[in-house]
Amino acid sequence: MPLAPPAADPRAPRPALRLPRFGAARREAQERLERLRAPLPHSRRLTLVGAYHYSGRATTTMLLGSVLAAVRGEPVLALDGSASEGSLDAFLTDRNPAVVRDLGVLSSTPAYEEIRARTTRLPSGLEVVAHRRGHFSPNPAHQQEYVHVLAQTAPYYPFVLTDWSPLRLDRSADVVLDHTDRLILCCGTADWFLDAAVRMLTLVRGGGREDLARRALVVATELDGPSGRSLPDTFARRLRVEPDQVVHVPFDAALQSPGWELHRLRPATTQALLRLADLVTRED
């Protein structure tokens, strides 16, 4: 039976996406929008990791979640995945004070309204559960609570995006990786970013998750300004993924502030995000 998330409020405005205006690019974007609106048979668990500091990982988490929620017209959930670090709070204003642990202590079968009361909802429809800002001690029950949260939210959210803040993929990441349907690795476009991305996927493979690494999506974002250059032909081969698993996101000045809005993104940025969203919905 297809997933049946809560019905969207028909009165709630959806953010407009800036699509290419003409030609094949316009038709391609519209075709992707149609595919993205198709029902899903089950909730997809997406984990986003960064190859290095300032790799665009948290921004990509919020962007991808916002695009999926806005296009589908149904709630999508994003949450901080680490026990002791978080990045999503920086994107929230007037946030709900609840944290991931507040979801973890709910019953095994909470109503959607109980979960919604503990999330911060963005205009796109993306719902976020973030760690509080600042330093805090790891919650020793985090791993059990994280698995509990995934089970609780699966009936209501077609996509659950986990933002993994630490650069390390040590044993503390095992529970997140073990409950990941699709890994998304974020990096810049410079050569040293590629080296870091290769090391990250090597760690994933070395942990016995060859299939997760093989199917990983790689988001290469121009972070410091427009380069005008394409990614090198060897980019995907060095990462040991297929070329169509790499999404190149152009520089967009609108993303320099955490207060970006979907309708202000360049059409080329929106195109790249729609392609990424299309890839995470595919069964393969």
Image (cartoon, rainbow, N blue to C red):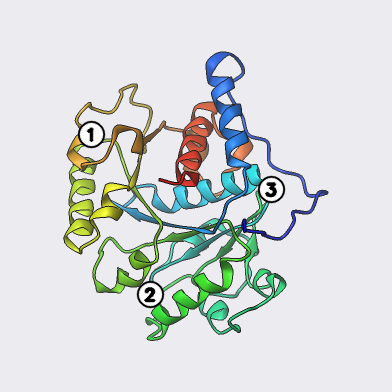
First reached walking from the N terminus: tag 3 or tag 2:
3
| Mark 2 vs mark 1, CA separation in Å | 33 Å
Query: Which residue is the site of mark 3?
Result: 73
Q: Quadrant of the C terminus?
A: top left
| Mark 1 vs mark 3, CA separation in Å | 35 Å
Query: Which residue is the site of mark 1?
Result: 235
Q: Is residue 132 left or right of residue 173?
A: right
Spot occupied by residue 48 in the image (x, y as percentages of width and height): 39, 55
The kind of residue on which mark 2 rests is: Ser
User: Taking 200 as reference, is 220 above or below it?
Assistant: above
Spot occupied by residue 18 in the image (x, y as percentages of width and height): 61, 29
The structure residue drawn at horizontal position 42% and vertical position 32%, both measured from the top left corner, is 251
Q: Is residue 7 left or right of residue 219?
A: right
The kind of residue on which mark 3 rests is: Gly
Which of the numbered marks, if any, corresponds to residue 181?
Answer: none
How packed is label 1: few (under 14 Cα within 10 Å), some, or many (20 or more)? some
The structure residue drawn at horizontal position 72% and vertical position 71%, both measured from the top left corner, is 113
How packed is label 3: few (under 14 Cα within 10 Å), some, or many (20 or more)? many
User: In this view, which residue lies farthest toward the front?
Assistant: 1
The residue lying toward the viewer, choosing from 7 and 163, is 7
Secondary structure state at the residue bearing disc 3: loop
Spot occupied by residue 97 in the image (x, y as percentages of width and height): 60, 74
First reached walking from the N terminus: tag 1 or tag 3:
3
The residue lying toward the viewer, choosing from 275 and 164, is 275
Tell whether label 2 touches label 3 (CB within 8 Å).
no
The structure residue drawn at horizontal position 17% and vertical position 38%, both measured from the top left corner, is 238
How packed is label 2: few (under 14 Cα within 10 Å), some, or many (20 or more)? some
The residue lying toward the viewer, choosing from 178 and 227, is 178
Query: Which residue is the site of mark 2?
Result: 84
User: Taking 190 as reference, is 143 above or below it?
Assistant: below
